[in-house]
Each structure stands twice: as structure tokens, then as C-alpha cells.
Image (tube, rainbow, N blue to C red):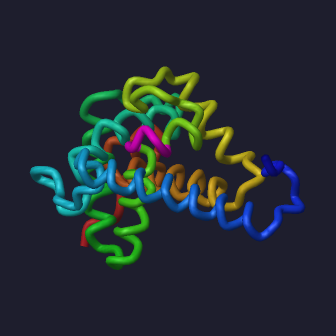
């Protein structure tokens, strides 16, 4: 049996590795399609975000926002999620698709476990697990994971600080009335 961990792969081993990786990715895509993870239908009262994205976002907001005095798990997270949806609605279709792909990857168990270290439902993960996942992505040696961390944290922070609930705690009176 050839050593597939050696960097000196022969042509046959490389083809086998490529075929195996293609089968794994194809299976993951098929599983996502059959389980509804890749559904692009927006959730009720949302223009872009899907039903599968909402619990994930509600779980991630506290880990990303931190101990903000006006942030709670209920109305504040819902207002920030609605703001995120409005922002995505104004974004280009390419950006919408990229964000939905990122959220879909975090919802799919086959990709979530190896990439985040959280093998169970991400929406039910503890705050310590979520913070560890975010730090893992921030400090990753892979550029793709660092970009994913930046996208998640910036989108969630922008959507939270765009809500009027966040303004009073930081002393911002809001935009001038025109």
C-alpha cells in the first residue's frame, strides 16, 4: 500500500486521493441538498436569511458582541438579525451568495465539525465553545478560515451597532433627523 502521507505522491496515488476527495465533496453536497441545508428560500419575514441561518446567528451574536449592556438574547438578537437581513438585501447577489454559503457550511454537520471543532448543533453550543471556534478561525494558518472569521464578526458587529438599541449604551444619540 502506498504511503499517502508522504509529500512524494506518485501519479496513481494522487489520482486516488483526488477521486476520494471528489467523492467526499459530492456526498457532502448531496447530503446538504437532501437535508434542506442548501435551500435558498428566505425565512418568513426575511428577504435573504434562511430558516437554518436564524438559530445559528442567534447563538453567534453573544459570542461576537460580548458583554454589551444593551444586548440580550431576545429582542436585541432579533433586531440585529433583522438588520443583517436588510443589509444583505441591499448587497450584491454575489455577496448574498457568499454569506449564505458561509452560514450553510456552519449549519452542515459534515463541514461544521472539522472546521469549527463543534460537532453538535452550533446553535446549542456553549459560549466557551463558540468563542473557541471564533478564536480558532481568527488564528488559523488557513487564509480561508481567517476570512470567514472576519466576515462573521464584521457582519454581526455591523448589524448590531446599526440598531438603535445599541446606540444609547455607547452615548450615540443616533443620526440627525432630516
Does the magenta run of residues contain 3?
A: no
Residue sitting at x 11%, y 53%? 45
Camera-nearest residue between 6 and 106: 6
Report whether 12 appears left or right of 133: right
Q: Is residue 105 above or below residue 61?
A: below
Q: Is residue 53 above or below residue 70?
A: below
Q: Position of residue 65 (x, y in %)?
A: 50, 39
Camera-nearest residue between 66 and 145: 145
Q: Can residue 20 be seen from the camera position used here?
A: yes
Residue sitting at x 59%, y 33%? 117
Start-end of magenta stretch = 107-111
Q: Is residue 19 above or below residue 153?
A: below
Residue sitting at x 26%, y 69%? 89
Total marks shown come to: 0
Does the magenta run of residues contain 109?
A: yes
Q: Quadrant of residue 57?
A: top left
Residue sitting at x 44%, y 50%? 105
Q: Main secondary structure of the magenta part?
A: helix
Q: Position of residue 175 (x, y in %)?
A: 35, 62
Q: Can residue 70 be seen from the camera position used here?
A: no
Q: Position of residue 177 (x, y in %)?
A: 26, 66
Q: Quadrant of residue 30?
A: bottom left
Outermost residue on the front side: it is 1
Q: In the rendered image, which quarter contains the C terminus?
A: bottom left
Camera-nearest residue between 140 and 91: 140
Report whether 171 appears left or right of 93: right
Q: Position of residue 100 (x, y in %)?
A: 36, 59
Outermost residue on the left side: it is 44
Amino acid at each position: 500500500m502506498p504511503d499517502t502521507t508522504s509529500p512524494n505522491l506518485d501519479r496513481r496515488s494522487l489520482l486516488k486521493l483526488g477521486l476520494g476527495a471528489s467523492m467526499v465533496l459530492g456526498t457532502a453536497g448531496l447530503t446538504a441538498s437532501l437535508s434542506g441545508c442548501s435551500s435558498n428560500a428566505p425565512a418568513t419575514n426575511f428577504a435573504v436569511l434562511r430558516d437554518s441561518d436564524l438559530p445559528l446567528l442567534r447563538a453567534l451574536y453573544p459570542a461576537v458582541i460580548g458583554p454589551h449592556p444593551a444586548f440580550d438574547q431576545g429582542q436585541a438578537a432579533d433586531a440585529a438579525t433583522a438588520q443583517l437581513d436588510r443589509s444583505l438585501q441591499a448587497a450584491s447577489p454575489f455577496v448574498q451568495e457568499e454569506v449564505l454559503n458561509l452560514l450553510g457550511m456552519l449549519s452542515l454537520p459534515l463541514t461544521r465539525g472539522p472546521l469549527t471543532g463543534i460537532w453538535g448543533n452550533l446553535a446549542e453550543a456553549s459560549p466557551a465553545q463558540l468563542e473557541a471556534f471564533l478564536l480558532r478561525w481568527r488564528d488559523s494558518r488557513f487564509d480561508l478560515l481567517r476570512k470567514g472569521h472576519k466576515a462573521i464578526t464584521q457582519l454581526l458587529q455591523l448589524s448590531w451597532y446599526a440598531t438603535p438599541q445599541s446606540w444609547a449604551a455607547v452615548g450615540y444619540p443616533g443620526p440627525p433627523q432630516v
